[in-house]
Every structure is written in structure tokens, then in C-alpha cells.
Amino acid sequence: MLHVLPVELSLVVLSYLPLSTLCPLHSVSRKWFNFFSQNQSTIFRNAAILHGYTHPATLLLEDALSMHKGDPWEGATDWKDFCKLYVAMPFQHPFRVLVS
């Protein structure tokens, strides 16, 4: 996929993957590792929006974190951490939208 599709399209496709699939993809190969290293913030921000973990207008991680105060949110240092914490939370996701 990385050598066939444009980067922008690859980023959109990856956003649709469940977090359990998305997180280990960086270990598939050196190309995937490099791709994830360069695009991790975009990949997980898009996934957070698509899966309803944050509002679609949220541009910065700080904005997403400002809606969630206290533990464990202080531990989120990037969009990947934010997604992992959100999935682990035992409550309804306020921004969850169904995509058809």
C-alpha cells in the first residue's frame, strides 16, 4: 500500500482501522516504521476523529485534552496515547458518530 497509494490516501485508509490493528503496524517492516514515524500524529488524529474520540473540528491534541481533565489524561503526550486512553475509558464516547 505504501508504494502504490499517495501518502494522503494511505493516511485516510489507515484512519479506518481499529486501534488494535493500527498500533502494531509500525513493526511490519522498515518502510512501515518510517511511514509511521513521519506520520504518527496525523494517523492517530484522523483515527480519533473518525472513531468519534474527539470532535471533528479539533486540530490540536491540547484542545482534545482540554475536554478531559484529570487522570489518566495527564499521561497523554501524543494522539496515539490519547486514542489508547479513550478506548480504555469505561464511558460513552460523546463524539462518536456513525460513518456510512
Image (cartoon, rainbow, N blue to C red):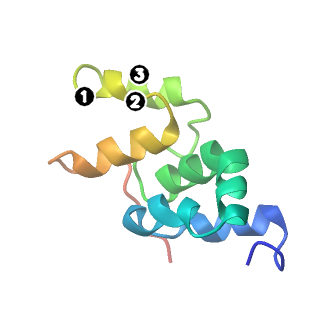
Name the N-terminal-most of marks 2 and 3. 3
Residue 72, labelled with which disc?
1
Mark toward the viewer: 3 or 1: 1
Name the N-terminal-most of marks 3 and 1. 3
Question: Residue 89: x and y, percent?
Answer: 21, 45
Q: Classify residue 13 by image quadrant.
A: bottom right
- Amino acid type, mark 3: Ser
Query: Are discs 1 and 2 less than 8 Å apart at CB?
Result: yes
* Residue that numbered label 2 is attached to: 76
* Farthest residue, direction front: 30
Q: Is residue 61 above or below residue 7?
A: above
Q: Is residue 36 above or below residue 16?
A: above
Residue 94 can be seen, yes or no: no
Q: Classify residue 15 by image quadrant.
A: bottom right
- Amino acid type, mark 1: Pro
Q: Secondary structure at mark 1?
A: loop
Q: Is residue 92 above or below residue 100?
A: above
Mark 3 to mark 1: distance in Å? 13 Å
Q: Secondary structure at mark 2?
A: loop
Residue 66, labelled with which disc?
3
Graded by Cα atoms within 10 Å as few (under 14), some (14 to 19) or many (20 or more), the crowding at tag 3 reads few
Residue 64 can be seen, yes or no: yes
Question: Residue 39: x and y, percent?
Answer: 69, 49
> Which is nearer the eye, 55 or 40?
40
- In the drawing, does residue 9 fall left or right of residue 37? right
Identify the residue shown where x is 33% and y is 21%: 74
Identify the residue shown where x is 83% and y is 80%: 4
Mark 2 to mark 3: distance in Å? 12 Å
Mark 1 to mark 2: distance in Å? 8 Å
Q: Secondary structure at mark 3?
A: helix
Residue 35, labelled with which disc?
none
